[in-house]
Image (cartoon, helix red, strand yellow):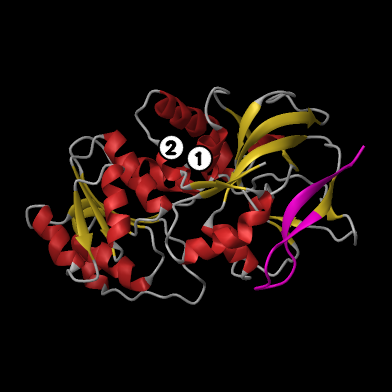
Amino acid sequence: MPQTVKGVVARRKGADVEVLDIVVPDPGPGEALVAVETCGVCHTDLHYREGGINDEFPFLLGHEAAGRVEAVGEGVTNVEPGDFVVLNWRAVCGQCRACRKGRPHLCFDTHNATQPMTIAETGEALTPALGIGAFAEKTLVAAGQCTKVDPAADAAAVGLIGCGVMAGFGAAVNTGGVTRGDSVAVIGCGGVGDAAIAGAAVAGATTIIAVDLDARKLETARRFGATHTVDASNEDVVDRIRELTGGFGADVVIEACGLPQTYEQAFYARDLAGTVVLVGVPTPEKEVTLPMIEIFGRGGALKSSWYGDCLPERDFPMLVDLYRQGRFDLDAFVTERIGIGDVEAAFEKMHGGDVLRSVVVL
């Protein structure tokens, strides 16, 4: 029968979030009920609260989560009760034109649960953030959104793979194709940017340049593998990246801010035939203008990285294995562990740049 649990809800644009009783249905066909153990506080959750994603309030926030499958609906074969899983927002359909072409990481028709979770007091249907809604003691998702990983891993760390860490790591490794001996520059050293730096280090890049305005973030970036730093508050970013790469520019430049000015820096800071990867999420009004002769003359590739071009069933277990082997420090992304009532305060800390990730422990 349906269960009533606590969840963090954004009821109106810009209003403080509230911890409310929410009703979670039993899983139907193709669905799974997950008891959430941990969930990271991501910038995307703040974007939802501020109306920056869409206006389908009220939202059940949270999406960087790990937990245990409690029950599954009819026809579910990929997970069973008791499985330790990281939740993802790319449950591939297997039928769309991308999947049929053997590119499931680009699936154009990803699945979510079909039954709504609701506010207990009013019966209002909730819109779960990224189809997950995991700032809650339990959540209902499509079974394909559950990716089994090593149960010995720390849930607070591996849950972050579900969004920001995968986006950054994948931007470097999957989208950017970083490999041994490459030079890489990462502009914007928050959680996603640091994950891109760590991914570049795992992939064997020999020059990894971190760029940010905040000296604290640059110091943190070194811990994730940056070999050089550029303080954008007092250095010319393009000139400095070229100087650190023999005058040529980086093989791969990853823009993790989503801003026109930093995208332009990325464009001019890459080597001839180099690659620019946009993983920072721009707001709808942002525009960039570049001379077409420069786009043509420099060659290479201008790419966008959506969810790090990941395939969760392939990439999540691999990242957890790297973590368990001591080759990818997921623990370093966890700044603090907080309670379900502390999400609004975590948003404030996020504004101040004081955390990589606050993680709600349920």
Q: Residues within 10 Å of mark 1 (few under 14, many from 20)?
A: many
SS type, badge 1: helix
Estimate the x, y position of residue 41 in percent, counting from the top left: 56, 53
Residue at (68, 72) in percent of width and height: 15
Residues under labels 1 and 2: Cα distance?
Answer: 9 Å
Asked if the residue at tag 2 contacts the one at tag 1, i.e. Cβ–Cβ closer than 8 Å, the answer is: yes
The stretch in magenta equals 1-20
Asked whether residue 9 is drawn in magenta, I would say: yes
User: Which quarter of the figure is the C terminus placed in?
Assistant: top right
Q: Which mark is residue 242?
A: none
Estimate the x, y position of residue 327 in percent, counting from the top left: 34, 29
Q: Nearer the viewer, residue 335 or 236?
A: 335
Q: Nearer the viewer, mark 1 or mark 2?
A: 2
Asked whether residue 235 is drawn in magenta, I would say: no
Identify the residue at the far right of this view.
Answer: 1
User: Which residue bears the numbered disc 1?
Assistant: 161
Q: Residues within 10 Å of mark 2 (few under 14, many from 20)?
A: many
Is 360 drawn above or below residue 286 in the view shown?
Answer: above
Amino acid type shown at disc 1: Ile
User: Which residue bears the numbered disc 2?
Assistant: 330
Is 36 drawn above or below residue 152 in the view shown?
Answer: below
Disc on the earlier residue, 1 or 2: 1
Estimate the x, y position of residue 38 in percent, counting from the top left: 61, 40
Is residue 301 visible in the rendered image? The answer is: no
SS type, badge 2: helix
